[in-house]
Amino acid sequence: MKFIIFCFSLGTSLMSFSQSDIKKDIEDKYLMDLHIDQDSTLMTEFQRYAVDLFKTGTSVNDTILKSDTYKVGVALISSQNKTAERDVAFTLYTLCYKDLREKDFHKSIYFGSGREGLSNFFVDHDTEEQKKMIDEAVLTYLKFDSIPVANPAYQFAKTYFVEDTYYDKFYSTDKHSTLKIGNSYAYLRQNGNYIIQIEGFPDKTLHDDTEMLYVNDVFVDDWFAISVFIIDDSSGKAYNTIFKFE
């Protein structure tokens, strides 16, 4: 794959589920496991902020969710594995929607009706210069409470074209969240001008697909990303708070 300014990673759809099987939501006890109180590093402060927004958030407004405007924010990305400590880093993360439904009735008979989909991609780097740009964009969000509009990493996150194959199915849960199903699965809620997404992995030891959709300790222990997307960044403001820096 050709890299343009930045390399990137995308979540892909590797599992399929029927909508009737996923009427579940993340319980408060698992949110509390994600709410780290023991230290005051920048990362744990942002994580607490995101979890608190998620806890008090409500269902995502369909009009906002299905907008074709890319929503960019800051995320904690985890590369934890089973034999090592969690390695967590900040980056920019984008949420985008696409209507993949077939509009032509006759084509839909032969090729299927298609679906609506959500996609995420996070900005990664090939060089130290690219990493510096990503770090500067995150710093602008968290330390200066503003949108890094002139930053190349932000511009990349705001405009990169996501191909149709990278959009995952999404559904409303029984309670407050929107659930996005792919290789990992994510719960999304809205709180004011923010969409908060907590992304984790199902328990691979379970054989029943419906059971895999129940949030359990595996989801918390193997979370992949905790993100706060900004719905409307036209004001130039970010999270309405200045995060503490070491």
Image (cartoon, helix red, strand yellow):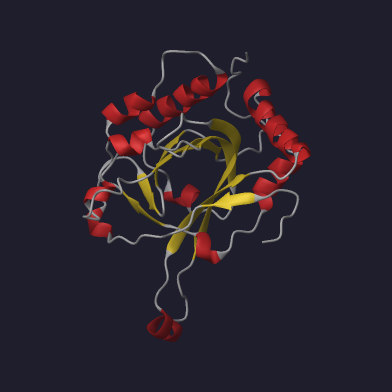
Q: Residue at x 46, y 75 (%)?
A: 102
Q: Is residue 147 visible?
A: no
**Residue 242 appears in which quarter of the rendering?**
top right
Residue 151 coordinates in the image, percent (x, y): 75, 38
Residue 97 coordinates in the image, percent (x, y): 51, 55
Location of the C terminus by quadrant is top right
Residue 44 coordinates in the image, percent (x, y): 49, 21
The answer to whether residue 202 is above or below residue 106 is: above
Location of the N terminus by quadrant is bottom right
Q: Residue at x 37, y 44 (%)?
A: 201
Q: Residue at x 36, y 48 (%)?
A: 179
Question: Is 210 on the left-hand or right-hand side of 194?
Answer: left
Question: Is 2 on the left-hand or right-hand side of 82?
Answer: right
Q: Is residue 101 visible?
A: yes
* Front residue of 200 and 162: 200
Furthest residue to the front? 83
Q: How many marks?
A: 0
**Residue 215 appears in which quarter of the rendering?**
top left
Q: Residue at x 21, y 55 (%)?
A: 208
The answer to whether residue 15 is above or below residue 199 is: below
Residue 221 coordinates in the image, percent (x, y): 36, 33
Question: Is 135 on the left-hand or right-hand side of 119?
Answer: right
The answer to whether residue 143 is above or below residue 12 is: above
